Amino acid sequence: MNDPLHILNNAGPAESTAARRERFWRTLEEAMDDPAVRARLGRELPRDEGYLDPVSRRRFLQLSAVTLAVAGVTACTKQPLEPIVPYVRQPEGMTLGNPLFFATAFPLSGILRPVLVRSNEGRPTKIEGNPQHPASLGGTSVFSQGSLYDLYDPDRSQTIEYLGDVRTWAGFLGAMRGQVNAQKALGGAGIRLLTGTTTSPSFAAQVNALRKTFPQMKWHVYEPINRDMAKLGAKQAFGQVVDTRYDLAAADVVVSLDANFLSGEFPGFERYARDFAGRRKPDAGREMLRFYAIETSPTNTGGKADHRLGLKPSDFQQAVRTLGSLVQATGATAGDIPGPFGSFVLAVSAELGRARGRSLIIAGDHAPAEVHALAHQMNAALGNVGKTVFYTDPVEANPAVHIDSLKELVSDLQGNKVDLLIISGVNPVFDAPADLEFAKWIGAARLVVHHGLYQDETSAHAHWHVNAAHYLESWSDGRAYDGSISIIQPLIAPLYGGKTEHELLAGFSDNPDAAAYELIRGFWQSQQGGATGTRSAPGAMPGENAGGTLPPATPDFEIWWRRAVHDGYVGNSMLPEKSLAVRAGAIPVAAESAPNQLQVVFRPDPTVYDGRFGNNAWLQEIEKPLTTITWDNTIWTSLALAQRLGLYEAAMQQKQNVVELELGGRKVRGALYVQPGMPDGMITVFTGYGHTHIGHTGNGFGYNACAIRSSDAPWSAAGARIAQTGETLPIAKIQPEQQVHAGDIGKTTRDLVRIGTLEKYRQNPHFAQAAETQEPGTHGPDELPKDSLYPGWNYSSGYQWAMVIDLNSCVGCNACIVACQAENNIAVVGKEQVLKRRPMHWLRVDTYYDDLDNPRMYFQPLPCMQCESAPCEYVCPVGATTHSTEGLNDMTYNRCVGTRYCSNNCPYKVRRFNFFLFQDWNTPQLKLMRNPEVSVRSRGVMEKCTYCVQRITKARIAAEEEDRPIRDQEFTTACAQACPADAIVFGDQNQKDGRTARLKASPRNYGLLEELNTRPRTTYLAGVLNPNAALHTRDVQEAEEE
Amino acid sequence: MADEQHKHEEHIDEMSSHLLPAKATILAPGHTFATVTDKISAVVLSRDTPAAWLIATGGFGLLAVWLLFATAYQLARGIGIWGVNVPVAWGFAIVNFVWWIGIGHAGTLISAILLLLKQKWRNSINRFAEAMTLFAVMCAGYYPVMHLGRPWLAYWLFPYPNTMGVWPQFRSALVWDVFAVSTYFTVSLIFWYQGLIPDLATLRDRSQNKAGRIIYGILAMGWRGSARHWKRYDSSYRLLAGLATPLVISVHTVVSFDFAIALVPGWHTSIFPPYFVAGAIYSGFAMVLVLAIPIRRIYGLDDFITIKHLDNCAKLMLATGEIVAYGYIIESFMAWYSGDIYDRYVMLDRMGGKYAVFYICLISINVFFVQVLWLRRIRTSPSLLFIASVIVLAAMWLERFVIVVQSLHRDFLPSSWAMYYPTFWDITQFLGTIGLFAFGMLMFIRFLPMISIFEIRELLPEAHVTLQEAD
């Protein structure tokens, strides 16, 4: 009689209707006067009655569980049994809709770049630098920013495959078991492990542990962009491999010997860019740093030099040798110095001599070993060691010379010694030097396992392919350029069940199913030594470094671990300085290129690197520094060489511009490109292109430079020949016109990028502002028309957002562009649309040259100027673009009908139009990638930089909740946040003591095209060069003329 | 014929003096009311359609159908199928819009201004010039709508009370365009239709079949030609003419504001309004000639569209052409005189840059070639005049191309400079509007009297005879 309905249905016989009417009753049950109910009514706390529901709670939950389980039966893949629970109780610190930030680190060629990753509801959506980490200080590179796209790349490898058939991880492990058991008997003599550069101590420990089972196993490392030359140079100078760390902040004179340290590929770039920019401020307390660059192929680093000298490799080596002898000895005069660099080298050595202990010579990773050794000698001779230059143990876990390591592997392959070749994270079939014929010899291995993010050229030659986990899906660890240790923590479970390299390696160990988390945590726990405090030194093999010194133990591992993961790095884990004595005496002269032959230098591509970002649409479509080319690599030539070869017209007009480049009997076909600043007698080729197996996005663009690269001369070679093919390859440039004086008439110049010398700045700090008033007929900032038909808006109260971009600080690395793209869900349009001049970037970095032979290069980041009297606003017929009270030029996408009048009337051309449906509205992975706070634009609407209005709004909400105004620099835009050089400063200009207002008050502050009375909110700080008066170059001459 | 008698009686005074000197040249001798009516209405009422008409209608009709297809394709894919980009965000669409709108101008000028100025020679060409205006404005109106990124939202440019609570932004010249062009089209349509009513009544009366009688009857709106009808007709016609007259000036002035109020170097200049209006009339008369010369030949209407008409049109072309030439000179001069580096550069680039060949072409035609119209021999030779008019039309198209595209492609920041290349769709959509225009004109010729019957009859000496008797 538990059922109340039953009670109701059976009411009646106990009492007559009339009798019931005489009583008062409270409930129907009472009215029915059921004895069971009567009994229950008397009890105060009824229990065990089962209440009204015949289904028990237990039963209900059982049924629910079955329902949920059965609901999932239809799916093909078995999901791992992990608790998936909705937030019954909201986790602490998390509010749905508010993103969380997690510290992790992005490994590029093994070197970790510390980052903070924004996570919106569990999806990583934006990468920022880790401001607390000394290797980042909040700055990022194009690669860190772009690495987010790789995570969501729909072309990423999604399965484990054996000869093209999909297999499971268990299947893979099962297959490997047989191999492992067979090799145990042989001591692992047939096992070869090939990885890229790694700095992971736990990976090294794993390899070493594996060596206990397989003592004969060999670990090879090879990446096409390696630091072999630095290692060899260090061996020459010190007899051992060391890493060199620089302190640019302590240097007054910096000489770069082909070092591109202001580009993302350079280890420590983020920190070096910050330090460099900090010392290039003419108004800072300390004397401005003077920077000389001697380089072969032009770089944006060279573009930032006060004096840049471009030399072909043979001359370059000569020049460094001369400089070395001048710095280390005295007595040489200009007359003694041969070559085209005499006066330059002499002036540099004199300057270095004056700045002992305050100077710094940086040798580039691509410079010959001899140059590195000479740089070490010079730094020692100048007393810079310990002041601006520091030596440490290598951060690499296996600091082998890559080329030698790969050669050894190939020779083992040739000798049929390889039974099991495990290739993890590299693509040697694509990028090994051509003379090693890796693609041919990989077939000599009995079983090849490839582990990588993509099914690439190498996996096409492998038996097994294991899809790798992206670093944002991985537990791992490693070191930054300075040696400090970071724990890489995942932001998301692997989208396709990818495996980390730790898990892959564990697959060959006795604990094949170990999860990366356990491996990493276990390793560090073992390092902490448990209760006894002893630390097991990872058993390093001779010549290998399993991670150098490890951080000191703390009593409680859990606290240490949590802190390390939370902070993104282990405090004070930088590698300690080593005091080393430089070997005196002559450095062996590197094999010299025949000076009369055409020389070729190999360089990493500035956006797709060695090809690992080949399928990364963001990195393919951002402008490459200097050239602004997208989607292709080109063959750089000087103007003179192009003319001599009769290819000038071809290269300039992009008609029949494809040439066949022959080097050592091997040929590639690529587009010729005349790069200003290229020394005569050499060409530059770039790695990373010519993919055939990476994905829909990246296949088929450019040429593969590694196809003509030889293991003997990996960075520069001589004896190249160029022949025209008659084919045409259109080159998609973001900025086709790069002459700074383009469009000038007579003596009137378009004063867009304003640069002066330090001397000029001291004489007249307002030199950049005066430029307008000097020109008759144009309005200077003080002459802006005061009267207008429309009453002006009073901007003196409330928040007034503004931006200042320091042209002196901007190093032209383009990280801001990718940051903007990620933050604002900016579409990628593809090469064809770039060629049609329809790229969508809201921010571009205009790059100008003033000369073709030895140009100065100017970088000018150009976001929306947020003009106070915006020309775009008054022409919009539907009021889709309007001005906010806080000075923003807002764009209402929903209102836009797409007349494009605003774009025509924008003198800065920063508006971008969706000519087609450029956004991918269908691919599910790309939906996950997007920032949920920024609308995804559709076809036919205009879009533009909003000063990251979503961030402004978020800051305002946070401030209003706390009933306070938004603090200065409390938040910033994506571009400003990404900038490693701190060149972009954003904030409220009404906050008079704020950073933005202070910079706006700088005498160097000027507005672009201010004479049009647009009143831009984004302004620039004029660049100031610090030339050496002893060098009678153009800078000085111009200063004298003025 | 009774209708006409009444009408003439109403118009005694004004006709007495003006018609006599002109009649010898603007109407061939030997015509009577009957012959005029027969000749013109026969084109419409005849069962024999000229082969030339069939061929032309087929060809241009196909082009018009292509326009339909291209429009559908464009709606499906987006305006990315065109060559427009950033910085050249306006391309063929706006060039063609300005060109078509310009062509429309001659119609209104002939029908309204020349009416008020009592230029009687207009009577034989005003009807089809007005039709030309209507079709040209239709072709023009196609572009501003279709060139939008989201053409289905074009109605947002109209100020109408709506639930979105939004309103057009009246500082934008594009909103002014909406008013200018839509007013112009409406007034032109009413003016044209009112002018047709007496002739529609004539067709109704003369139609040989029932369908014709019904259709023309409905369109004639019960016109009986009574004195009261004529009186009201006359006063409203003149009122409309007065209303249309400022539109001749205003439409292209407003169109020129699209450019003049922008700050793009090469656009931002105060000469644009008069220069655009003159250019519009110039190209409009060229189009009148391009249409009139083959029509009078094919339909044997030499009696009504005489050499005198061609001569007058050519003279107007010459006059407006000189104003346009003056505009070019002032434009260049002001670019130099302003001292503005951006203006100067755009002008220099116009003369020597990548699009210089277009500029040189248009200058050599609009400034130099047009001077051949000083020669009476050219003005009175239909075939030479036809060729000259086609060349002038092409030059005026180039002028708009140079203004729109060349100015945009070299603006303030060299970093954004880029070329504009039209695509297949750009070109064929333009051909499609030409098809639409010609198809419309051919339909008009076939089904409506292309020359105003009653106004031609006004030119006849008989009209004056009745006038004196009435006194």
Image: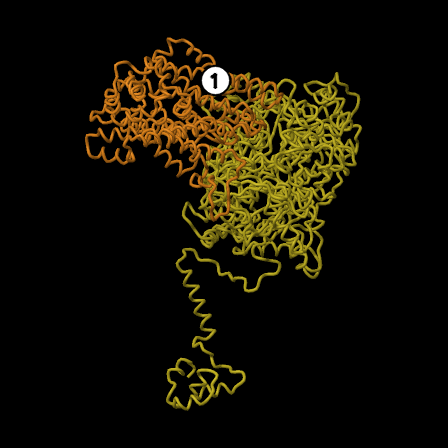
Please tell me in which quadrant of the rendered image residue A344 appears: top right
- Give the letter of the chain under mark 1: B
Q: Quadrant of the N terminus of chain A?
A: bottom left
Q: How far across and down, in percent of the image, does residue B20 sit?
A: 34, 14
In the image, residue A396 sits, relative to residue A1020, either above or below, namely below
Image color mode: by chain
Apparent side of residue B5 relative to residue B273 in the rendered image (left or right): left
Q: Which chain is yellow?
A: A
Q: Tell me if residue A867 can be seen.
A: no
Apparent side of residue B320 relative to residue A536 in the rendered image (left or right): left
Hey, what amino acid is under mark 1?
A: Val
Picture residue at 55% right of the left edge, 54% below the top: A121
Q: Secondary structure at mark 1?
A: helix
Q: How far across and down, in percent of the image, does residue A203 sit?
A: 59, 49
Q: Nearer the viewer, residue B314 or B112?
A: B112
Q: How far across and down, in percent of the image, does residue A449 sit?
A: 48, 45
Q: Which chain is orange?
A: B
